[in-house]
Image (cartoon, rainbow, N blue to C red):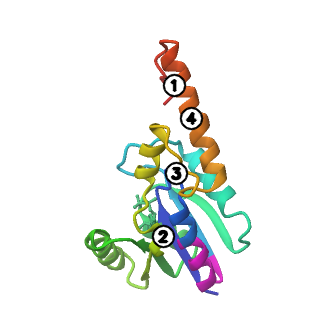
Amino acid sequence: MTVGVLPGSFDPITCGHVDTARRAARLFDRLVVAVYAHPKKNLMFGLDERVEMVREATVDLSNIHVVSYEGLTVDLIRDVGGDVLVRGLRAVSDFEFEYQQATLNRKLLPSLEVVCMFASVEYSFLSSSIVKEIAENGGDVSSLVPPNVQRRLRERFEATSKARNQGVQPSTF
Ligand code: ADP
């Protein structure tokens, strides 16, 4: 049994992530989608919400398992019995970072293989941060994120603008 692990921040999961997860799920007996608890990024969604969104978006794929993790990705891979670390590659700009990470991770866990999957053309421009910016400014993200994420983004920004209109500091955001 070959187990792939697709780690990421998923803040929030986009159609590009879903596409990579679906394609990777066909390559492995089991694909673990691992949501990283504390990425060095400004997060919009808490860990539980990010995990839930990934679960909802991949619920139809029976060999995908969604987990969250802290610490080193190689430790998570060991814990879940992973064989292959899967990452998505969009533009050349992704390459340097992914290459560095892959090399480091293989140093830490020499038995690990790292596979980078090219993003599908229609999602090659897509990132979670672009989605957040469009949604924040009232733009249409329906072709960029799964419906469950679209709903959450709408709720989030409706709540934020309501709080702003009432002069309340939206402390929970
Ligand atoms: P990270 O913070 O680890 O980069 P992300 O949530 O941004 O986490 O991405 C998780 C994985 O999904 C990464 O391998 C990333 O390259 C890949 N990915 C991100 N956006 C896309 C996309 N539009 N198409 C394909 N893969 C993507």
Which residue is found at the position 57% from the left and 76% from the top?
A: 81
Q: Are marks 1 and 3 in contact (CB under 8 Å)?
A: no
Cα distance between the residues tagged 4 and 1: 9 Å
In x, y percent, where is residue 8? 47, 61
Q: Amino acid at mark 1?
A: Ser
What is the spatial separation of the Cα atoms under label 4 and label 3, in whole angstroms?
A: 12 Å
Quarter containing the N terminus: bottom right
Numbered mark located on residue 12 in the image:
3
* Residue at the spot of label 1: 161
Q: Is residue 29 magenta?
A: yes
**What is the distance, in whole Å, between disc 2 and disc 4 at their CAs?**
26 Å
Judge whether 123 appears above or below 109 on screen: above
Residue type at numbered disc 4: Arg
- Mark earlier in primary sequence (2, 4): 2
Crowding at label 1, few (<14), some or many (≥20) Cα neighbours within 10 Å?
Answer: some
Q: Is residue 52 visible?
A: no
Q: Which residues are magenta?
A: 20-30
Could you say whether the residue bearing mark 1 is in a helix, strand or loop?
Answer: helix
Task: State the mark number for residue 156.
Answer: 4
Chain-order first, disc 2 or disc 1: 2
82 falls in the magenta region: no
- Callout 2 crowding tier (Cα within 10 Å): few <14, some 14–19, many ≥20: few
Give the mark nearest the N terminus, 4 or 3: 3
Q: CA distance from mark 2 to mark 1?
A: 31 Å
Q: Amino acid at mark 3?
A: Pro
